[in-house]
Image: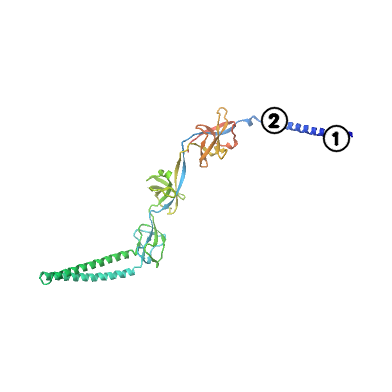
Amino acid sequence: MTRQSNAPQEGKTSLLIAIVGFVAVLVVLLITAGLGNATQSPEARLPVNVSTSVIALQKGFKTPISIYGLIESPKTTSLSFDIAGRVNEIFVEEGERVNEGQILAHLDIERLRAKKQELEASLSRADADLALAKVNSERTISLVQRKLESSQRLDETEAALNIAKAQRSQIQASLHSMDVEISKATLKAPFDGVVTRRFVDEGSVTNSGVPVLGVTGVDAFHARFAVPADVIEQFSMGQVVDVQVGQRRIQGTVTQRLPIRNVQTRTIDILVTLKNNEGVRPGDMGLLTGERVHNEAGAWLPVNALSNGLRGLWRVFVIANNQQPKLEARVVEVIYTDGKDAFVRGAIKNGETFVNEGTHKLAPGQVVSLSSQRESGAM
């Protein structure tokens, strides 16, 4: 009976001893940690050394823009015959250079030649009829003057003479028209250039206006750029600009600025005539650079000066007290960045000192020391 009553008492005593032991161990650990902090070197509590710059606010900024365009030849055409017929000869191949006035192709003109011969024969007959009409007219005039023929006969011979003249003029006009038709059976180069396409071959029957050859001029090429309306005033007539084609930079002159705006793209075309065609082909891509002006107040800061803030914004650390420099976080919004610097706006003032790098290691309220300082200004 006595053993049973002592058992609960012994359990309570063991529990109490365990609690006291745990508390004692915890106190020892806390004291040890405190001593460890107390024994840290004074250097560990020194202010962090930071590099700083001075904020320079500005009313706006400029960003570079790239405008792409195509190299074009000022003269490009598809040549065709004005008359229908069978293609008899084509004297050039694709890629060949041609000179203005050079004969490029012929149509078969046998039918036209035969018709011309008919007209020439008709002209010979008309000449004979006209000669006879003149003789009759002169004879009739003589007879009338001698009262041997009536005036009516004179009128008839004069009418016959006029008819003969008209018939001869008509045949001459037909012959001239035939010469024009024959000349249209010959295709000539309208300007110096290069044959870019050959649409038909010998023996093909072509109709009037159907393309036969494509020719592109080799004079100074120009580049056509679709320029946004807000930067069009940067490019004036006669202005010398650089156009990049592949790895080459070629000087050119703005020769045209179209007075209309593209309805779909809302851009305005300009033409830049290149000073050198070497290594450039129509259809190549050209690059023209410009600047876009942004009327937005703010400042340029290094990207390394920014750290993540709340709700998608950014923060920059400024020096709040120059006697005992401490960090103060300011929320800013990034308007533009080129990867190295960023134009920001927000809770910053002109002339304030900010940390320009290493902000990921810092925190608001932290005491720092200033190692170097430079001004952050316009780019």
Picture layout, residue 333 above or below residue 136: above
* Residue 40: image location, x then y, percent: 67, 31
Q: Is residue 235 left or right of residue 176?
A: right
First in sequence: mark 1 vs mark 2: 1
Q: Quadrant of residue 94?
A: bottom left
Q: Is residue 218 left or right of residue 144?
A: right
Query: Quick one: label 2, few (<14), some, or many (20+) residues within 10 Å?
Result: few
Depth check: give the residue in front, 75 or 371. 75
Picture layout, residue 32 above or below residue 289: above
Which residue lies at the image location 87% right of the left edge and 35% below the top edge?
4
User: In the displayed image of the protein, which residue is found farthest to the bottom?
Assistant: 148
**In the rendered image, which residue does mark 2 sit on?**
34
Q: Quadrant of residue 46?
A: top right
* Residue 70: image location, x then y, percent: 43, 52
**In the rendered image, which residue does mark 1 sit on?**
7
Picture layout, residue 46 above or below residue 270: above
Which residue lies at the image location 47% right of the left edge and 42% below the top edge?
63
* Residue 344: image location, x then y, percent: 51, 38
The residue under label 1 is which amino acid type? Ala
Determine whether the residue tagged by mark 1 lies in a helix, strand or loop: helix
User: In the displayed image of the protein, which residue is found farthest to the left?
Assistant: 146
The residue under label 2 is which amino acid type? Gly
Determine whether the residue tagged by mark 2 lies in a helix, strand or loop: helix
